[in-house]
Image (spheres, rainbow, N blue to C red):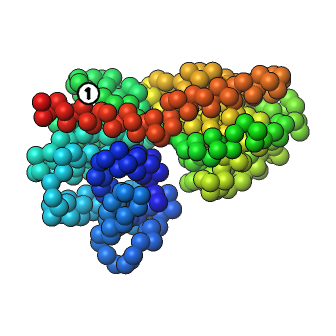
Amino acid sequence: MPATRTFELSKLLASAGWEVTVVACRFNHYTFEYDTLGDADESVTEVQRDGVRWVFIKSSRYSKNGLSRFRNMLGYAWVASRWARGQSGPDIVVGTTVHPFAAEAARRLARRFNAQYYYEITDLWPESLVDLGHIERGSILYRLMRRLERYSLEDAVGVIGIMPNVPQYARDFHSLQVSRFCYVPNGVHLMDVDEAGPSSRRSPIRGQLAYAGGFAPAHGLSAILDAADHLNQVCAGEFEIVLYGDGPDRKNLEAEVLKRHLPNVRFAGLVPKADLRTRLADAEICLCTGQALPIHRYGISFNKLFDYFAAERPIVYAVDSGNDPVASADAGLSVPAGDGAAIASATREIHEMAAVDRQRLGTNGLNFVRSQHAFPVLAERLDKFLRDGLGSTHS
């Protein structure tokens, strides 16, 4: 089932008494294939799972950013809107980005049904696209996205965000005050960790460093290669960096490893989510990097970071962001984004700690993610936020 965060939160909301319908695109952004669900030719497919009604919209294919992806976004919004018009009116409609056309379809449907509209922001488009160089500020597409974003901010009875500083973003770019905001970041499953208990704690492989996530420029993996180069020069053979994942930048990164003769870097490919935590537990230290982007001042919520916390491993955090979960958790060391030498130095500092001190950092991270990012905690927060909104309307 795709969209892990949405599914987990929806499942928990359903168990709390909500009737939840999720309208999602059937074309999977991560595999670039259609999810296998019933009749492949159907434009709309419905699936029930764990109390949640999923409605999958079949939109057009794409393989990279550009006109084909734009067509996919518009096609999804159009078919989803047409399908929803035949449904009974909900009390609440949540318009979720990443792309603003999905949120705009939800906003219009909320108005049609006279329902409460909530705007859920999982990525700050169009500003993040500008920072990444995908579109130009002032272009037609930029102005369109900015306008749709403003409509949603103005019409929403509440805003939900995976970044903590969304209200500041609304003030900076739209001069709008967000009166009701709920911070619901990405989360993790801890059931397997809690069931296993401390006695199952794995001993790490001395000197193994791990990165798990996407391979794209935004994730700042070039800094990891710089760190590998520094480590190779200073203490050759002492560290191995294992990279789990895939993405459009993988071939470039592999070529760079060969060009720079980095024997201490290994590409391990994609790992099923169920196996990832075990792989991360093999590492002595986990690496969280990100490209230095102005948009990060409003905060980040990287899935890989919470997987690291759950694996109970110390972290080197190299992201310039408005929030620093690693510092908040006292679960590792933070260094400037893009600074390979600083990453290498922080890695060696943690490596040279006593084992009990490294374990303390890992345990701090696990305790932090249990109290702040476990899905039941996040779902309870969201449940209260939505119920309070309905209560204020009905009072």
Residue 195 placement: quadrant: top right
For the residue labelled by badge 1, is the local secondary structure a helix, a strand or a loop? loop
Judge left or right: residue 330 versus residue 133: right
The residue lying at 52 percent from left, 29 percent from top is 371
Q: Which of 323 and 218 is in front in this view?
A: 323
Q: Which amino acid does label 1 sit on?
A: Arg
Residue 153 in view: no
Q: Name the residue under label 1.
A: 180
Where residue 289 appears, x then y in whole percent?
60, 35
11 over 345 or under it: above or below: below
Judge left or right: residue 67 versus residue 79: right
The residue lying at 30 percent from left, 33 percent from top is 385
Residue 321 in view: yes
Judge left or right: residue 308 versus residue 167: right
Q: Which of 332 and 345 is in front in this view?
A: 332
Where residue 72 appears, x then y in whole percent?
33, 61
